[in-house]
Image (tube, rainbow, N blue to C red):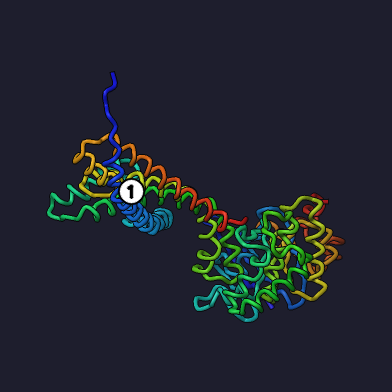
Amino acid sequence: MIQIRDLHKHFGDLHVLKGINLDVNKGEVLSVIGSSGSGKSTLLYCLNNLEQIQQGSVHVDGINVHAKGTDVNKLRQKLGMVFQQWNSFPHLTVLENVSLAPRIVKGKSKGEAIAMAEKQLKHVGLGDKLKHYPNSLSGGQQQRLAIARALAMEPEYMLFDEATSALDPEKVGEVLDTMRLLAEEGMTMICVTHEMGFAKEVSDRVAHFHQGIMEEIGPPEQIFGAPQSEHTRKFLANVR
Amino acid sequence: MFDYNFHWRPVLRTLPDLIQAGLTTLEVATLSMVIGILLGLCLALARMNMTGPLKWLAVTWIELARNTPALFQLFFFGFGLGAIGINLTPYTIILAGLSFNCAGYLAENFRGGFQAVPDTQLKAARCLGMNAWQAYTRIVIPQVFRVVYHPITNQMVWAVLMSSLGMLIGFRELSGETQFFASRTFRIFEYFAVTAVLYYVIVKLILAVSRLLAMRLFRY
């Protein structure tokens, strides 16, 4: 489980996260919504030590993420991450994109790594693209490639940072379907998203962030049906 | 009106020597490129990531290499160091001069190359649990290499042509050798005409090899 306690993050003078307390349980799907600049992406980056924090703590399965002695490379294997810009590695084939990290990070043999990569690529529907280079794939396919790449590390958690925001509208569906599939399989997921339909339908809980504060968290019925916070009400009124 | 008699025979007789000297040219250019690439990479990284003396050393090096005549740089390693009692062999002088110059130019190519690879690539690699070394060697540098590949080829051509300055410090590379025979036989036009063709052939060979290599290396 992920435990976030009194998390503060500053970028210079900018106070981006102002004391976040949040637990994410195994098997849970948590969606994080909120306007741009509310700190929701930064929260994700704090979970796998892509960003340092100024106060508070984050524990992932009991490991203190920002403690000095923590092996961040080991920690990051637990936390798969998918970015808004899919960041496929352009110089590697689809298969190599996915099999590289299991081989050099986890020390799997070439055969094992390729088998794992093939399995995950089939899983996201790219089984017929193994030898292609990413530049011949559509945005949606590249994003599914990024998901397969993260899954091949057999993570315990998946973090999605606005995974569909940079896609053409008609490609959003295929990526959301893949995310839905993972949720059904019981993957623990934290999805920073602007897709309210997805948040409503797939999440166990939804958190609304506003100016660095977690305004409200609760089951989707509460957040979308009867939000308690004034800010949350306003935000949802605007996005609909 | 035109009473110059061409005499090609002496040139043809010494053609094996010229070709041998051409190989020396190629050797010096290749070696200085290898050194230049390694140093240029260090200079680019120092310029981008360091502060203080190392950064300023890199900036000064790059500025001098790019903005002063290559001949002066060569003279510095020859006559400049000679004046304070450090006497290098012509081979070392040309190697040092070319390496110094190539490193400066290549450093800027590398800097451009690094800037062309989005830093999100590094981030994505690190998120997969790669350490910094793995992320750089497996993800970032191969992409930088592609960006700088053709500029490196250009620089290699330039190194071959620039090595002809070796003639002025008494080094018997292709031009030096040509000069030597030309002044012995007074067939100056013939010798330099043939040598020009040899340079042309060497450069075309380099470009052809580079193109073949690129087809194998960059499939994406």
Which residue is drawn at the image coordinates 57% and 69% (left, top)?
A: A49
Q: Is residue B198 left or right of residue A69?
A: left
Whether residue A175 is visible here, answered yes or no, is yes
Q: Chain of mark 1?
A: B
Q: Nearer the viewer, residue B67 or B197?
A: B197
- Percent from the top left, x then y, of residue A196? 81, 58
Residue positioned most to the bottom: A62
Q: How many marks?
A: 1
Which residue is drawn at the image coordinates 34% and 55% (left, top)?
A: B27
Q: Nearer the viewer, residue B98 or A221?
A: B98
Kind of element beneath mark 1: helix
Which residue is drawn at the image coordinates 37% and 55% (left, top)?
A: B30
Q: Quadrant of residue A7?
A: bottom right
Residue highlighted by disc 1? B101
B19 up-or-down from A22: above or below: above
Residue positioned most to the front: B9
